[in-house]
Image: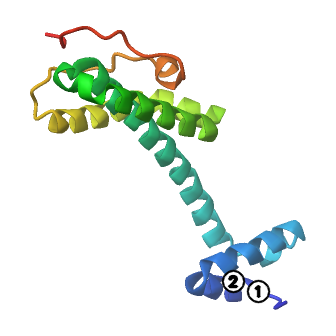
Amino acid sequence: MINYTVTNLKQLYDFDDFQWLEETVKLLKNKQFNKLDLENLIEELEDLGKEKKNAVASLLEQVIRHLLLLQYWTEEREYNLVHWQGEIYTFRVQLRRKLTTNLHNYLESELNEIYEDALGFVKIKTQNTVKFPLECPYSLDQLLSQEWLPSLSLRSIT
């Protein structure tokens, strides 16, 4: 095994970030903190946090999209009902597997923004033929609950 210095690790990071990660983990396990490439380690940890947040936000957006289509796009509901319900189920399962208390709190704080993104998508998907609520009609608990689905009316909101 090569005995890496901080300078060597920085060069390794630019060349092979996976090997850099392996070497960084070894240094951490051996408590060789003075040999760590802290600059890139901090960047990687920050990116990891962002990736997790983006992943759960994206999954929640998918849940919202499909719930909105299911509840309000009545013209397509009969044809797409089972598909949309299956998608809602799948995205909720994926969310459950990734969700931590911290990420749950993040979703709670970002719910309005995530809803706006989902709303933009469903407006395009329906070619603005459906009137969707301007604010999220669902609580986070409803969105995450595997059993919950909205009541389905025969018409969209007016």
Farthest residue, direction right? 30
Q: What secondary structure is found at the residue carrying circle 2? A: helix
Q: Residues within 10 Å of mark 1 (few under 14, many from 20)?
A: few
Is 31 placed above or below 132 here? Answer: below
Q: Is residue 55 visible?
A: yes
Is 30 placed above or below 70 here? Answer: below
Q: Amino acid at mark 2?
A: Leu
Whether residue 116 sits left or right of residue 139 in the image: it is: left
Q: Amino acid at mark 1?
A: Thr
Q: Residues within 10 Å of mark 2 (few under 14, many from 20)?
A: many
Which numbered tag is attached to residue 9? 2
Q: Nearer the viewer, residue 136 or 95?
A: 95
Q: Is residue 133 visible?
A: no
Residue at 27% from the left image edge and 27% from the top image edge: 69
Q: Position of residue 156 (x, y in %)?
A: 18, 13
Is there a contact, CB below 8 Å, between mark 2 and mark 1?
A: yes
